[in-house]
Image (cartoon, rainbow, N blue to C red):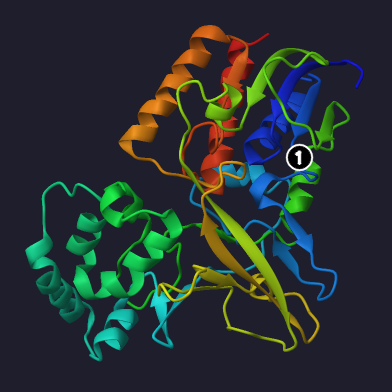
Amino acid sequence: MKKIKTDFLIVGSGLYGCVLAERIANKLKKKVTIIEKRNHIGGNCYSEIDKLTGIEFHKYGSHIFHTSNKNVWNYLKKFTSLNNYKHQVLSKYKSKIYQMPINLKTINQFYDKNFNSLEAENFIKNKTKKFRKKNPKNFEEKALMQIGQDLYKAFIKNYTEKQWGKNPKKLPSSIFNRLPLRFNDNKTYFKNALIEGIPLNGYTEIFKKLTSNPLINVIYKKNFNLRQKNIVNNYIIYTGPLDKLLGYKFGKLEWRSVKFKKKIINKKNFQDNSVVNYPEKKYKFTRIHEPRHLHEERKYKNKTLIIKEYPQLNNDEPYYPVNNIKNRLIHSKYRKYLSNNYKNIIIGGRLADYAYYDMDMTIAAALNKFNYIKKNIK
């Protein structure tokens, strides 16, 4: 490949990289080259149309946009409109379907009760009394003190072991913070989000618009290393894993990955919901996605597409950081080394930051980083 001259080289075409590319090209009028190891744009938010059913699906698991950050939404709405989808997760346990997160209906159904909100709260307080601690040391301790042993064993323990490949006692308590408990009938997953929905024309359309400026060039199926000789640039914005970038010199960061298996079902509807969890160990997968339910405004054929999600260990396709003390220490060594030795490298995004960001958090971080670049880089 001939040498490419660019002002900014961005490694990775996910949300973080593409938002920065759009801002740099449109506001600073600088030339941007994005290199992407996959054959498509959009990172894990990429969506495509299934040829046999016509259903648009998210190739790397269901992505529901939600935010209460008005700055993020004011930015993103320039590139998309959202439908009216509100996310609800169900869980199938012993052949029965329960609402998740655990709410009043879940508690009443599971215990065969008819509690009101206050009665349910007092009931769970009694169940968790013996597990309460001031500072829970791990995921299991935090879960038991919040929901008690019965609900934990039914819906959380085995699901967590499948998802993370670890005993919950070896996971940080902070992971449980993503699993709310409610004592009302609110069944929406993101109850506090001011904005929620699925892009009307899919996620991929957003990335095409973000990178539509002629100053932006995207190169696919290309890996990056620090000895790259064919790209001449002033600054590098790196959004991938830091351990891989630096040849694992301080050790490997732990990641969990997922594998997806698609199947077409010859009926209009399979599970009445976009996502159903399967917490029991007898199922190797953790959940089933049925993407037709993400776009109820569309008319699809009398066939549906389901996607089973299987967690696995795979550092080549990292999804979820195992954010314990050991890995945080390794990650901090990589950050410090890059800061001291590569002044022209800017890092950010879910993989580079070794963080479990939602989409709106990633966009917010990219917009903040652009403000830094605008002020400090000429």
Question: Would residue 196 be visible to someone looking at this image?
Answer: yes
Please state if 136 lies on the left or on the right of 177 as rendered: left
Q: Which amino acid does label 1 sit on?
A: Leu
Q: Count the marks.
A: 1
Q: Position of residue 296 (x, y in %)?
A: 68, 76
Q: Residue at x 17, y 61 (%)?
A: 145
Q: Position of residue 334 (x, y in %)?
A: 47, 21
> Is 329 drawn above or below residue 182 in the view shown?
above
Please state if 53 lies on the left or on the right of 332 as rendered: right
Q: Position of residue 181 (x, y in %)?
A: 30, 66
> Is 24 drawn above or below residue 336 in the view shown?
below
Image quarter where the C terminus lies is top right
Q: Which residue is drawn at 68% across and 15% down?
A: 235
Closer to the camera, 311 or 212? 311
> Is 206 drawn above or below residue 97 in the view shown?
above
For mark 1, give the secondary structure.
helix
Which residue is identified by label 1? Answer: 210
Q: Which residue appears farthest toward the right when viewing the image? A: 2
Question: Would residue 63 be visible to someone looking at this image?
Answer: no
| Local crowd size for mark 1, using a 10 Å CA cut-off: few (<14), some (14–19), many (≥20) | many
Q: Residue at x 39, y 74 (%)?
A: 186
Q: Residue at x 39, y 86 (%)?
A: 94
Image quarter where the N terminus lies is top right
